[in-house]
Every structure is written in C-alpha cells, then in structure tokens.
Image (cartoon, rainbow, N blue to C red):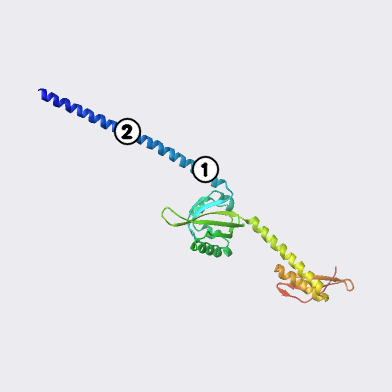
C-alpha cells in the first residue's frame, strides 16, 4: 500500500542518512588519528634525534659520565664509553658488576671517598671526591669525581656525575711539594752555615735536615781527609738508625 511504501522509503532514507553520518564521523576520526600518528611520529623522531645528539655529545667530551647508586656496591645504570679509555674496563663490565668500583679504588682512599660522598648527600651538597683508581694494566690513576643527587623512575636514589683523570695535575702537585721540600732543606742548611761554627755540628744538622725533609731511611755524609787518606762518615744514618763513624781507606 502507499503507506507501506512511504514507511519503507522513509526508513531507507533515515538509514542512509545515519550511515552517511556514521561514515562521516568515522572518516573524521580516522583523519584525526592519522594526524595524531604523524604528530607522534614527528615527536618521536625529534626525541630520537635529540637523544642521538645528547649521546653523541656525552661520548665525545673528555669526561666519563655516569649514573649510579651511591655507596660501595651501588648498581651502575649508565656509564659513557670513555670509561674504557680511562680504566681499560668496558661499560658492560661496569654495568654488570656493581662491586667493580669498590675493588678498583685504592684501599687507602676508599673509606675517605665513601664518607665524603655520604656526608655530602646527607647535607644536600654535591659530592666532590679525589681518589686513586686501578686500571686494568695495574696502574693507579688519580680521579676527580663530582656528582649530583637525582631520583630514578621508581623514586630510588641515584647520583649522576662525571669522572675526570687528574693524574697529571697530581703529579705536578707532588713535584711542587718535592721542590718546596728541597728549598726548605737548602734554607735550613743555609741557616746552619750562618749560625754554626762547629763543623761537626754543622754536618750533623745538615744530615738531619735532609733526612727529615725527605723522610729518608738512609743518609750518608762522607768527608775525605787527605792527610790520612781516610773517608770519614761524620753523619751516618742507615736503616732508620744513627750509626757510629767507621772510616774506610780511600781507594
């Protein structure tokens, strides 16, 4: 009948309209999703590019950058490739062996370095430490270690810092100390020359000045007497003890 025909026609029209609306909405949703995917891809590409530049920077600067847990056996989360040139051990060895630092640091410096790190962290300061580290070939090098406190993704405490080889500076400081000691010894001998007229006392004071300045365990001052052709030892300090003068024949 006509009414049935109209009902069917209107139903078809409504269904068609609804389909068109749904398809239009889906099309917009798909377009938005595609734009979001493209935007996300661009962001991810920028992040990867930034990460690559950052990693490239870390791997080229003359420092070893690291992220690790504080303490003697803290786990290392990251260490830059320069660690191999510095110590002879690969980054993988550092990351897989939490106790490697504790083994390599000089026994005389270990407790002091750990105490300095813990004290600085407790006070909210940046740990700054200097200690000797043993390389794979058995040498000890001087390290300057500076870090800051950071929190990991799971909120556990980490330190992020850098290691710098300061062996050359330490050797220069040691040479300077030796030179100052030499100058002090010369100054002490010069004062003795000015103040003393007793030759035996002068020789003894000179020997003592040299021995104490250089912390020597053996110091000999020999004097040749041409009249007797004997070599006298007015100052004889051997094996950390003063010895009696025992002359020997010259030649």
Left or right: residue 205 versus residue 9 is right
> Alpha-carbon distance for marks 2 and 1?
37 Å
Q: Is 32 placed above or below 164 here?
A: above
- Which residue is at the front of the view, 239 or 199? 199
Among the 4 quarters of the image, the one containing residue 214: bottom right
Q: Does the image show residue 23?
A: yes
- The residue located at (72%, 64%) in the rendering is 180
Question: x%, y% of residue 68?
Answer: 49, 55
- Please tell me how crowded label 2 is: few (under 14), some (14-19), or many (20+) other residues with Cα within 10 Å: few
Count of labels in the image: 2
Secondary element at image label 1? helix
The residue tagged with tag 2: helix, strand or loop? helix
**Residue located 80% across and 73% down the image:** 203
- Residue behind mark 2: 28
Horizontal relation, residue 192 to residue 85: left or right = right
What is the x, y in percent for residue 74? 48, 58
Front tag of 2 and 1: 2
Q: Nearer the viewer, residue 118 or 19?
A: 19
Q: Which residue is label 1 attached to? A: 53
Depth order, front residue of 32/77: 32
For disc 1, the neighbor class at 10 Å (few under 14, some 14 to 19, many from 20) is: few
Picture quarter containing residue 196? bottom right
């Amino acid at each position: 009948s006509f009414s049935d025909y109209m009902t069917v026609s209107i139903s078809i029209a409504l269904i068609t309209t609804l389909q068109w609306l749904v398809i239009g909405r889906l099309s917009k949703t798909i377009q938005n999703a595609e734009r979001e995917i493209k935007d996300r891809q661009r962001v991810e590409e920028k992040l990867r590019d930034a990460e690559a530049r950052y990693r490239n920077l870390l791997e080229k600067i003359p420092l070893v950058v690291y992220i690790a847990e504080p303490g003697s056996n803290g786990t290392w989360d990251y260490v830059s490739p320069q660690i191999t040139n510095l110590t002879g051990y690969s980054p993988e060895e550092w990351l897989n062996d939490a106790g490697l630092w504790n083994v390599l640091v000089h026994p005389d410096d270990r407790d002091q370095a750990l105490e300095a790190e813990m004290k600085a962290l407790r006070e909210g300061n940046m740990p700054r430490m200097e200690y000797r580290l043993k390389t794979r070939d058995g040498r000890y090098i001087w390290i300057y270690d500076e870090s800051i406190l950071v929190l990991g993704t799971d909120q556990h405490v980490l330190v992020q810092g850098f290691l710098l080889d300061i062996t050359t500076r330490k050797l220069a400081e040691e040479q300077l100390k030796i030179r100052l000691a030499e100058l002090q010894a010369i100054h002490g001998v010069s004062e003795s020359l000015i103040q003393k007229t007793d030759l035996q006392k002068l020789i003894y004071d000179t020997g003592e000045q040299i021995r104490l300045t250089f912390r020597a365990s053996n110091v000999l001052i020999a004097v040749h007497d041409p009249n007797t052709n004997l070599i006298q030892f007015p100052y004889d300090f051997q094996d950390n003890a003063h010895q009696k003068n025992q002359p020997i024949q010259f030649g």
